[in-house]
Amino acid sequence: MGAKRQRLDHRLDHRIDHRIDHRIDHRLDQGSSFYGSSPGSSYMFNPTPYAYTGQPPPFPVVKLRGLPFDCTEADVAEFFHGLDIVDILFVHKNGKVTGEAFCVLGYPLQVDFALQRNRQNMGRRYVEVFRSKRQEYYKAVAHEVSDSRGGSPRRNVPRAKSYDEGKESAEHTGVLRLRGLPFSAGKDDIMDFFKDFVLLEDSIHFTMNSEGRPTGEAFVEFASAEDSKAAMAKDRMTLGSRYIELFPSSHEELDEAVSKGR
């Protein structure tokens, strides 16, 4: 079984490498994005391959979070209009979309420009953009490939805690942070969303930006840590047409976030 698993792992690694290398080679050879030409591209976005002479260039990948469930590759390409996109990988869990994706860009310098799109809107949702790494992206590709085959060839390999596992193991203090709220959401909407729990209006706190506008986030104080932990069952359920992400938080984080919006 050990030798068979090694062969499976080798094939999987080869498939991932081939997928990326093929697209990056295409980008460098043809001078255009895998997803089509980018009229907004310029020399500032596209340094020559010699810019990193003498050292290996960093892998140009970013991670997106908070995407609409019906998001397509074309939507991501438009979100990063002007940048050269080599690959887009949507992240799934148990066959369902998670609102997360990886985007591989044509050049390392473009990562900095992609990060400037952080918290800009795609439709009615704002999207978070993070710097990522080759290993994190490759792991996501491996997961998608193994899921498509109906099993994971690396199921016995120890791995770091995932994003969701981190939520599950987080300590609860009775406070949750909500992300992805409609800008028009009110306290009544939050109370209805958590209708299985007893909430007071004063326990719901919306955060505002420096201009006094809603950020799409809020903090909710529950009667106990047990209640906030049970309320996590509502994570990624919808409020209206938008899915809401829940995160264990604290009174300190709540106070800091609310004070910033004053």
Image: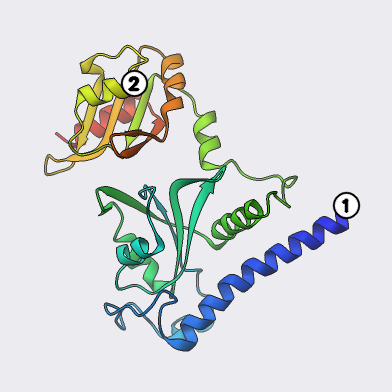
Q: Name the residue under label 1.
A: 1
Mark 1 is surrounded, within 10 Å at the Cα level, by few (under 14), some (14 to 19) or many (20 or more) other residues, namely: few
Residue at image x 47%, y 81%?
A: 27
Residue at image x 45%, y 87%?
A: 30
The quadrant in which the C terminus is found is top left
Quadrant of the rendered image containing residue 199: top left
Task: Give, as a three-letter code, the residue at label 2.
Answer: Phe
Q: Is mark 2 on a helix, strand or loop?
A: loop
Query: Measured from the top left, where is residue 70 in percent x and y?
Result: 38, 51
Residue at image x 33%, y 17%?
A: 195
Residue at image x 37%, y 71%?
A: 110
Is 261 displayed left or right of 180 in the figure? left
Query: Measured from the top left, where is residue 31 in percent x and y?
Result: 42, 86
Q: Is mark 1 on a helix, strand or loop?
A: loop
Task: Give, as a three-letter code, the residue at label 1.
Answer: Met
Query: Measured from the top left, where is residue 90 in percent x and y?
Result: 48, 55
Determine the CA span between mark 2 and mark 1: 49 Å
Residue 194, numbered circle: 2
Q: Is residue 179 above or below residue 132?
A: above
Closest to the observer: 164 or 97? Answer: 97
